[in-house]
């Protein structure tokens, strides 16, 4: 038993070491973008669900990196401020699944093909979700959802989503960004984003390490129908989101588990559908219910799930046609251990950058703001008002 725990922790630690620098880089880039983009401007830009607006919503979401809980809260905030419901949901999908830090980690743990598949699949799923909402969401339901969203259901992630720390004023973007206020804004956003997503990253790494160390490969091969290639391709996108829902792991935290599943036989399309299902885990479904009511929540879940399954099929077929599906079993899952190489140097640089930003955060009163985010992601059940 002790050896099994040690093996799980070793794999967890090795995976964390491998992706540490990429997380810092990704959150730094996302913080820089958010420091120069005002959220009020975003909501005004997303007032309808025309194709051009959907494209803008996807682009702005990709530039506004968030953990899954914060993305859900931010989508509600945009919806309340005038964004269309479809645009808000597209923004939510994009801000958790089409972001630079996710792409970097996918390339490190799974390979560049998965990064390309994530972005290609994201576009497909966004189109499918937008089309589905045109069919299943009528004006009355949207009006009911807006009324429910205005009832003041909020929590720690809602407070995080409501904080607009962008830098405005005269001068170029670069002059504002490298001003004292700009550096402070970047440091605050950087630490806030880490605080919001750290729990999910740790849980995801621990689950991935435990699964890699404890669950026999034969179990996954049986579950994924690996001995039947045609059935496996069909079954993977169906079961992928279900595993994600059961694992309770969201945002970037599900990438290490995706690497384990890929090594153990899930199809390429199954990995894609699994990764996008971070917005369907049970705690987030409960938040949808509080924000928009059961009628709209059921339609969100159905539209998201079916779009993820269909997106997995399309990506699988397209990548096989282009001969871009990599050989299974080559994802990094911590077996190789830690050695002194380029990853070590990158982690040292990343640690220095992170330390500088944390010091700036503390010296400019960020601790008090961080305390405002305290509590569980779905504290809305207690009915606190917006801050």
Image (cartoon, rainbow, N blue to C red):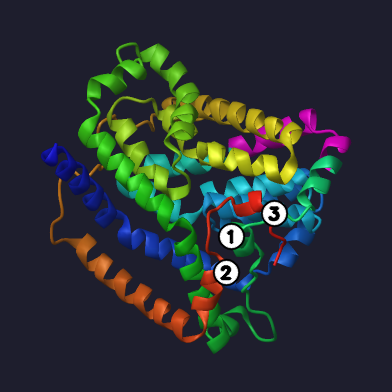
| For residue 359, above or below residue 142 | below
Residue 192 percent coordinates (x, y): 50, 67
Residue at the disc numbered 3: 383
Q: Residues within 10 Å of mark 3 (few under 14, many from 20)?
A: few
Residue at the disc numbered 1: 156
Q: Are marks 2 and 1 in contact (CB under 8 Å)?
A: yes
Residue 29 numbered tag: none
Front residue of 194 and 98: 194
Residue at the disc numbered 2: 372
Q: How many marks?
A: 3
Foreground: disc 3 or disc 2: 3
> Magenta stretch: residue 125 in it?
yes
Front residue of 219 and 18: 219
Q: Residues within 10 Å of mark 1 (few under 14, many from 20)?
A: many
Determine the residue positioned at 79% across, 42% down. 145
Label 2 and label 1: CA atoms lie apart by: 7 Å
* Range drawn in magenta: 124-142
Residue 276 percent coordinates (x, y): 51, 38
Residue 110 in view in this figure: no
């Amino acid at each position: 038993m002790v050896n099994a725990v040690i093996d799980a922790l070793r794999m967890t630690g090795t995976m964390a070491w491998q992706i540490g620098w990429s997380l810092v880089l990704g959150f730094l880039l996302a913080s820089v973008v958010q420091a120069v983009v005002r959220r009020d401007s975003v909501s005004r830009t997303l007032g309808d669900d025309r194709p051009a607006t959907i494209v803008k919503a996807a682009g702005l979401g990709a530039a506004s990196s968030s953990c899954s809980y914060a993305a859900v809260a931010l989508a509600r905030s945009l919806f309340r401020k005038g964004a269309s419901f479809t645009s808000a949901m597209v923004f939510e999908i994009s801000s958790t699944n089409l972001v630079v830090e996710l792409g970097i980690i996918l390339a490190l743990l799974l390979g560049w093909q998965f990064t390309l598949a994530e972005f290609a699949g994201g576009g497909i799923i966004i189109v499918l979700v937008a089309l589905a909402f045109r069919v299943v969401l009528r004006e009355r339901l949207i009006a009911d959802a807006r009324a429910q969203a205005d009832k003041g259901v909020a929590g720690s992630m809602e407070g995080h989503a409501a904080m607009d720390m962008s830098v405005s004023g005269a001068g170029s973007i670069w002059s504002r960004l490298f001003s004292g206020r700009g550096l402070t804004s970047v440091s605050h956003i950087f630490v806030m984003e880490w605080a919001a997503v750290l729990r999910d990253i740790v849980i995801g790494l621990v689950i991935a390490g435990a699964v890699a160390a404890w669950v026999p490969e034969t179990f996954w091969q049986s579950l994924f129908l690996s001995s039947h290639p045609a059935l496996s391709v069909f079954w993977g996108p169906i079961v992928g989101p279900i595993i994600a829902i059961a694992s309770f792991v969201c945002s970037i935290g599900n990438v290490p588990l995706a690497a384990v599943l890929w090594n153990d036989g899930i199809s390429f399309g199954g990995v894609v559908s699994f990764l996008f299902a971070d917005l369907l885990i049970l705690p987030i479904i409960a938040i949808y219910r509080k924000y928009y009511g059961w009628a709209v929540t059921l339609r969100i879940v159905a539209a998201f799930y079916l779009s993820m399954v269909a997106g997995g099929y399309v990506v699988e077929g397209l990548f096989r046609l282009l001969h871009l599906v990599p050989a299974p079993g080559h994802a990094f899952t911590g077996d190789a251990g830690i050695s002194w190489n380029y990853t070590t140097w990158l982690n040292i640089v990343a640690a220095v950058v992170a330390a500088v930003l944390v010091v700036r955060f503390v010296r400019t009163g960020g601790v008090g703001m961080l305390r405002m985010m305290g509590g569980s992601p779905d504290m809305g059940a207690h009915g606190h008002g917006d801050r």
